[in-house]
Amino acid sequence: MMDIFNGAREAANPSSFTRRSFLVKTSCFGASYAVAKLIPMPALGAELASDSRVSPTPIVDKGFASVRKIGNGLYATISDPSKGNTTICNGGFLAGKDGALLIEGFTTPAGAAFQMDALRMVSQVPVKGALDTHYHFDHSMGNSFYGANSVQLWAHATAAKRIVENYAPMQGADKAAALAPYEKRIKDAKSDAERAHAQSDLNAAAGVFQVASATVLGLPNHPIDPAKPPMPIDLGGLTAVIESYTGHSGTDMIVRVPEQNVVYTGDLLFSGWYPVCFDEKATISGWRDTLKKFAAFDKDTLFVPGHGQICGQEGIVSIREVFDDIAGQAEKMYKAGVPAEEAQHRYAVPDKFKNFPIFAWGFTIGPAITKLYAEWQAGKS
Ligand SMILES: [Zn+2]
């Protein structure tokens, strides 16, 4: 049977972790269909609302996303998936005197077009390029808009390959067959928790399938060798720097504007949400190291996360606490000899994070725990 969602299944079944999965690993954010629908985007935090860089009102607000000025020539596109799936992820753009840089391909070409229109409300400079911060579907399924408009599309050197590997097999695939392993997990669940987790994973996988199977794929045509960054981009009186970090997807790039202390992090930062960790190239230790580096950025840094509201350093503190909590609970179970396949379902969300959206268990907490177990086991041998 065609198994196009191997990634999340492996996360749910760590004994198959070493099995080579040659078809497709599914991507993050399908679960937004399940969960984020119910959770509207919180308003800007009080400190940010009074930050002189951040405009109190957006230049455009379509519900599914709004665009706000956050610096000199800097704009953030913040999505609210509870109000539609046109964009799902956050992004933004930078406009200097000579050129502009767009960030993200979003979930649909209409999402990429929305951001381009917003750029044209404030600047007519030529677009130097658009950057997918990583290959995941909610950041890349709108890429064909850039192709149709002759905008160079930049991304990590392996992003194009991974878009093809992950999403092309869903096209023309039978939906029922693709989702059958998820249905089976619901049927075979040994506890209510396991059943609920499996159901959230099914909803997520169905959402990804729906988008990927309906999309004309657009591939980045300007690969960035991850050894090259930091890569300065001169936009005319405004210099952006593209940097490469590990953690979320194996293809993660950020855009940093050091002169204004603004950073577009892609999914290396989930602001006020549980982080999506299922990717085969996601590394929990690598991601936590990256967050430590972000924490060492200037104390007045403004972060545009991949998902969730714009934040300052408190957003980095918060996601690090989430990782600490997952790792703390997992370590206790690991030391007590609880097997990974059981431990991944036993994590208890503390009060402190009870309002943090969990897109789907098997895309966030489950794989974080099985990956931590794998790291500890590897460290032991
Ligand atoms: Zn992602």
Image: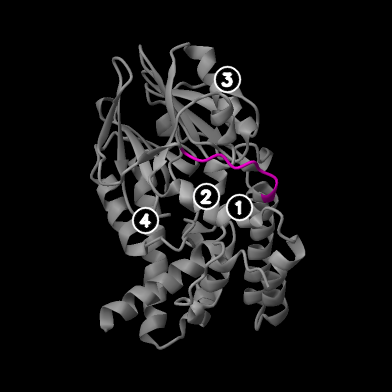
For mark 4, does the 10 Å Cα neighbourhood hold few (<14), some (14 to 19), or many (20 or more) residues? many
Question: For disc 2, does the CB lie below 8 Å from ligand 1?
Answer: no
Q: Nearer the viewer, mark 3 or mark 2?
A: 2
Of residues 164 and 334, the one nearer the viewer is 164
The residue to which callout 3 is attached is 117
Secondary structure beneath dot 3 equals helix
Q: Residues within 10 Å of mark 2 (few under 14, many from 20)?
A: many
The reply to whether dot 1 and dot 2 touch (C-beta < 8 Å) is yes
Residue 79, image quadrant = top right
Q: Tell me the amino acid under the disc marked 4.
A: Gly
- Residue marked by disc 4: 247
Mark 3 or mark 2: whose residue is earlier in sequence: 3
Q: Amino acid at mark 1?
A: Ala
Mark 1 = which residue? 168
> Is 214 contained in the magenta span?
yes
Please tell me which of labels 3 and 4 falls first in the chain.
Answer: 3
* 9 over 79 or under it: above or below: below
Point out the stretch of residues depicted in magenta.
213-220
